[in-house]
Amino acid sequence: MAVPPQQARDGPEDLLPLALSRPNDAFDRARAVLAAEPTPYAASMAHQAIGLVLREFGDIDASVRELQTARRLARLSGSADREVDVLGTLGVALVLAGRTQSGRNALNEAANTSTGRLHGRSLFRRGAVLHILGHHREALTDLNRAIAVLRAVDDSIWQARALTERAFTHLALGGVHRAAADLQRAEALFVASGQELESVDATAHRGLLALRLGDLPAALTCFDDASERFEKLDTMEPGLSLNRCEALLAAGLPDDAVREADRAITRLERIHGQPTKRAELLLMAATSALAAGQHTKALERATEAARLFHRQGRGWWRVHARLVQLRAGFAAGPPTLTMLRDAHQCVDELVAVASPDVPLARLTAGRVALAVGYATLADEHLTAAAVGRHRGPALSRAVAWLSEALRGEAAGDRRRVMHACRSGLNVLDEHRSILGSSELLAQTTAHGAEMANLGQRHALQLGRARQLLSWSERWRAIALAVPAVRPSDDAHLQADLASVRDVTRRLARSFERGLPTAKLARDQQRLEQAIRARAMRTFGATAQRGSHTRPGDFDVGALLDELGNDRLLELVDVDGALHVLVCGAGRVRRFAAAPTARVSAELDFARFGLTRIAYGRSAHAPTDALEILTRSGELINQLVLGEARRHLGDGPMVIVPPGRLQAVPWSLLPDLRERAVSVAPSATTWLRARRARGAGDSDTGRVVLVRGPGLASQGAEVPQLAAAYRLDDDDLVVLENGTATAARVLSAMDGARLVHIAAHGTFRADSPMFSALVLDDGPLTVYDLQRMHRGPRQIVLSSCDSGAVAPAGADEVLGLASSLIPLGTAGIVASVVAVNDDAAVRLMTALHQRLRSGAGLAEALCQARHEMSSDPVASATALSFIALGAG
């Protein structure tokens, strides 16, 4: 129950509980008390309340000044209890300000001179500071005693605070279940006592506990709820940013975590906030930068954090910052004997403080030892790190399995390597099974990148093409093995998506008219962040059902049976080198190709050339430009296919490239130009799409034609296609001229046989889930598409960049096209670069003519492309489209 206003006005003693319940009210009322010429006793309470509020709001230097004044006034009042109470509060503030020894002295004095209720509170404060400083065993002793005293005197609010602090001490020592019990008791006490601010803290604490237990959606939900409530209380809580960063890292979103940490550091510095929190945020920024591959930034931030922790006398934190320094230094290279000595010392220090990061430190030390040739020492560290592979949180077990794999590799034991890598990936499958956001599902693959690479590397060394294929598929298929997220019942999400469409449309109109766009751009960013956050809080279907199915080993035999004499080319990147697995005619053959970076650069050049021809921007005449592009295709052909060219057969072709090579014009390669070529994210995905096609091969079903706004061609193919399909199909839906809204298009697409959308497409490299098709009421995003119950069997997107995708995690893709296959779509035709709208009209009419004759999407696209060969612009446009899936 909240403190009633009348009661708060009855006396200054009510200011102190109010400071941690309704801080703004407490601040105003304390100022009012001071303005009324109070006694030293009342003035001491008012200054202490202001000091508490300032401490919670982050202005730690001002807080210390207020509390020093409160102590002076308490001494003047002649009340020993008053002075002890202020002394304890001041001690905490001094430590948070980085004045560690002065703070500890004040806390010791308060604990040694207090009795009864004040003694329990003093023990709590000292225990909390010991936890901050990393002295967890000592903290636990003080907190146990504090809880016993506070329970005996029936001081429920302070008992709840002590329980909360003890919970985090248990967490630091690995006692998750003890922490859960303490937090549950503390939250109940806070709610019953009407402590608004601390009840918000309790929500954030529940999120942190959920995070420790591996429940990311629940953690993110708690953090977002707490953030909204802190904002209403006009309070900044750096600890919440730390928690959110930890969740983002667990989700495999390190770039987001870096941005979150940097924003929090900037906000804290702006208000001259707690140096202790700044040090913790610097450590989190370093950890996040390391995960994001920003090794130099990670090293700088970790070094600064370690320096601050040392100055603050926080040994536990300093050694954890040293661990990040070591990991960043090893990643930046080269490893040295000095680095090995530092790593060994870091392990010893972490063991001494019972840190849960000991396995990670041992893994780091083992890596360094291997790199500098100390095999025995490396085995000692890796063996110790691998002990926890059968118990504990999923990500900790994954670290342990990776240690076991590296240990097996060092010993030349390939069987152990393969077993450890499989087991580690299985652990990550369990971790991912509760996630409902497609973005989280894709990004968490980054946690297993090294284990997958180890498995591929050893399969390659063994010369076993089938095993290399199985490992590649075991990795690529993880994200798509979990059912797609379909948050169609989330009214808030749908409302936010509608708002984004409206804001995006108004933003484009304002830009065209030269009007100010800053506010609309901010609104768009805010709405997109809200949508993304809501999607990340969605639970996966397997989590909702309480079951989990692992992808397991890929069935190579089933793939070969389905292919028959056709060919599937799986391109595998192992340590920067590209390998081609040619599957078909009952065999899997491996051929070495060029370095992946070289192939990627040449393909980027080809995409650039296609765009310039399509829009008449080439410095050469169209015919000459096309000839240059043809020569580029011949070079790519040699780099990618090489010796594999002799084993391609003469039938249809499926290409399964790595994520960074997904959206490329494969028909530009001479050996593929005359073939029906399909592209798929994985062989598993292709098999699923193939079966979806087989299950719906009937010629009956709804045909949907959509024409969006702003096309140079005015979507001229749509009326022509409508006339052609009306001749032999009564079930036709045409949406255009204001009727092509997101809601109507989604409804018509759901379960349709064939959908053709003539609309501008935008690919968002910064946030692929907001890649979109532009409709009459604004963008139709990937988030919108995921609301369908069943994807259309075939879909043609005659728009710019509609097939573009972005690598996410280690090797998964996100984008418009890749979101449809998990929903049951068998095949998609889409462009991989911006295309010429007028030339696309001719290509689309030719494509649909072949489709109506019974051809599959890849075959129809190949045949339509031949008709465009006499016109360089039309030919370049045709080369810009690919078929995804299985047609």
Image (cartoon, helix red, strand yellow):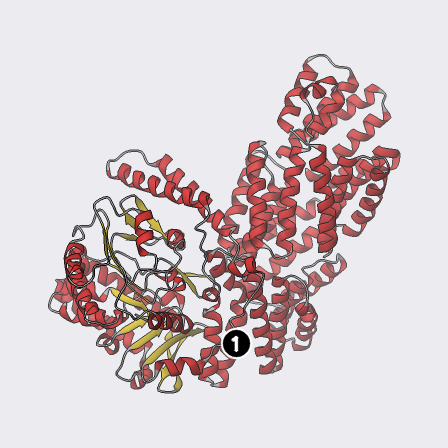
- On the question of residue 82 being in view, the answer is yes
Across and down, in percent, residue 330 comes to: 57, 64
Across and down, in percent, residue 347 comes to: 70, 63
- On the question of residue 132 being in view, the answer is no
Q: Residue furthest left?
A: 870
The quadrant holding residue 33 is: top right
Residue 553 falls left or right of residue 402? left
Most foreground residue, 784 or 798 = 784
Q: Residue furthest top?
A: 37
Mark 1 is surrounded, within 10 Å at the Cα level, by few (under 14), some (14 to 19) or many (20 or more) other residues, namely: many
Most foreground residue, 188 or 713 = 188
The quadrant holding residue 81 is: top right
In the rendered view of the protein, which quadrant contains the C terminus? Answer: bottom left
Amino acid type of the residue that numbered disc 1 sits on in the rendered structure: Gly
The quadrant holding residue 514 is: top left
Most foreground residue, 617 or 558 = 558
Most foreground residue, 749 or 795 = 749
Image height of 724 relative to 77, above or below: below
Residue 333 falls left or right of residue 605? right
In the rendered view of the protein, which quadrant contains the N terminus? Answer: top right
Across and down, in percent, residue 184 comes to: 71, 46
Image height of 376 relative to 837, above or below: below
Return the residue at label 1.
455
Image height of 60 relative to 462, above or below: above
Q: Residue at x 26, y 65 (%)?
A: 700
Across and down, in percent, residue 645 comes to: 30, 83
Q: Residue at x 61, y 36 (%)?
A: 273
The number of discs equals 1
Q: Secondary structure at mark 1?
A: helix
